[in-house]
Image (spheres, rainbow, N blue to C red):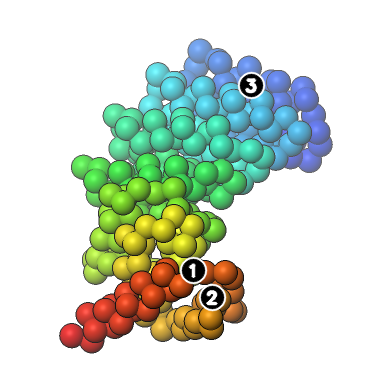
Amino acid sequence: MALGKIGKVVDNNKVIDALLDALKDKNDYVRRAACPALATIGKAPDNNKVIDALLERLKDNDVYVRGSACHAFVMIGKAGDNNKGIDALLAALTDENRDVRSRACNALAMIGKAGDNNTAIVGLLKALKDENHDVRRSAGNAIERCLCNTVTLEGLNHELIAELNSYIRASNNGLDFNDVTPAIFLRSYLGSNKAAWLPLVTYVALRQNIAVTVVENRLVVYGVKGPIPLENVDIESLDKLKIAFHNQEEELNS
């Protein structure tokens, strides 16, 4: 739709209103085409109105419209406050159509950058068990992208931490963790005091040949993006971390 290109150049409320009306058109093709057109102006002041309208299309009767709405969220990315879109996209992960489920994974990876990555990753971990290979692959790629844009995942429970650990360690998932710093898992461990994070911390650090130094109650993670300091760490947590690194090194060398 040419209207989408116009709306990207000027703040044209009439263009937005016309596209919002098109989302309610009786013709499936019109509704489908309106989704990406709206996505091109999703960073305009009317962003919330656009997102709300696209969320409604995730429940459209036409499978192609639902898929187009998911892709629109990929295009919008991290514009605006996208937290409210996560629940709708999580619901789309159970859509009867595999293409919609796959597109929902991609959208969660993008929308999670501005929203709640803990919630997004919970849904994506469940999608790793999808019956369709393409959906599982999309979920894995989405998890990787979410991890690259996350500060902490301390909200995950022990079961989900174990699932994430198993997936990262799997040798056949094709995931590239070069951009996933172990500092993410370190913060998650220190913030939650859940020992379930320790295997992930040590495994990712050792596989990437990343150094972790301890001076009194201060940790420093030396990654490709430079040193990441973590201050005021309690002694008990540090002792557990040292033991975990020793055990992981022995496991990798065995």
Task: Identify the image quadrant of the N terminus.
Answer: top right
Q: Residues within 10 Å of mark 3 (few under 14, many from 20)?
A: many
Q: What is the number of the mark on residue 63? A: none
Three-letter code, disc 2: Asn
Residue 114 shows in the view: yes
Residue 79: percent from left, percent from top:
65, 43
Decide which of 65, 110 is in the foreground and name it. 110
Q: What is the number of the mark on residue 217? A: 2
Residue 117: percent from left, percent from top:
49, 48
Q: CA distance from mark 2 to mark 1?
A: 6 Å
Asked if marks 1 and 3 touch (Cβ < 8 Å), the reply is no
Compared to residue 110, the image places residue 26 above or below, namely above
Q: Residues within 10 Å of mark 2 (few under 14, many from 20)?
A: few
Q: What is the number of the mark on residue 234? A: 1
Three-letter code, disc 1: Asp
User: Who comes first in sequence, dot 1 or dot 3?
Assistant: 3
Decide which of 26, 222 is in the foreground and name it. 222
Asked if marks 2 and 1 touch (Cβ < 8 Å), the reply is yes
Three-letter code, disc 3: Leu
User: Who comes first in sequence, dot 3 or dot 2?
Assistant: 3
Q: Is residue 239 left or right of residue 129?
A: right
Furthest-left residue in view? 254
